[in-house]
Amino acid sequence: MTDNQSDRRTIMKKVRAHVVIDGRVQGVCFRLDTRRAALKRSVKGWVRNLPDGRVEAVFEGEEGDVKSMMKWCEAGPPLARVGKVSVEWEPYTGELDSFEIAFA
């Protein structure tokens, strides 16, 4: 690794995004595939179904990885039909150490 690559890695901005996904997103493995996608990107957080049929998630990690997760959510798994992804940026906490499927 060159010095430039090393410097770039140490200054990557950490972010937190609270996301709500609308559409046909329950009963299509959205939570399981979200977890797989997050683990692949080293993103921490959680995902859960909401009683109104939407899916809610929190993503924490490197800015580029979190943005990649939000992009992934725009399509979701093959059987999903995403209508809208709402994002609220929150202060990074660093309190999350894994990515979990939460149950309400």
Image (cartoon, rainbow, N blue to C red):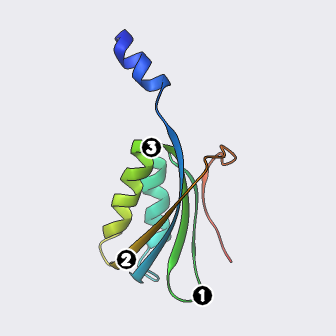
In which quarter of the view is residue 51 placed?
Answer: bottom right
* Element class at badge 2: strand
Q: Please name whichever residue, 38 or 29, is drawn nearer the observer in this view of the structure.
A: 38
* Element class at badge 1: loop
Residue at point 49%, 23% (across, down):
10
Q: Earlier in the sequence, mark 2 or mark 1?
A: 1
Q: CA distance from mark 2 to mark 1?
A: 17 Å
Image coordinates of residue 103 in percent, x first then y, are 66, 74
Q: CA distance from mark 3 to mark 1?
A: 29 Å
Number of marks in the image?
3
Q: Which mark is residue 84?
A: 2
The mark lying in front, picked from 3 and 1, is 3
* Element class at badge 3: helix
Q: Please name whichever residue, 4 or 42, is drawn nearer the observer in this view of the structure.
A: 4
Three-letter code for the amino acid on which mark 3 is drawn: Glu
Q: Which mark is residue 63?
A: 3
Three-letter code for the amino acid on which mark 1 is drawn: Pro
Q: Is residue 69 visible?
A: yes
Q: Earlier in the sequence, mark 3 or mark 1?
A: 1
Three-letter code for the amino acid on which mark 2 is drawn: Lys
Q: Are marks 3 and 1 in contact (CB under 8 Å)?
A: no
Image coordinates of residue 2 in percent, x first then y, are 34, 11
Q: Earlier in the sequence, mark 2 or mark 3?
A: 3
Badge 2: residue crowd in 10 Å (few <14, some 14–19, many ≥20): some
In which quarter of the view is residue 84 placed?
Answer: bottom left
Image quadrant occupied by the C terminus = bottom right
Q: Please name whichever residue, 41 or 87, is drawn nearer the observer in this view of the structure.
A: 87
In the rendered image of this protein, does residue 53 appear above or below residue 70?
below
Which residue was labeled with disc 1? 51
Badge 3: residue crowd in 10 Å (few <14, some 14–19, many ≥20): some
Image coordinates of residue 64 in percent, x first then y, are 39, 43
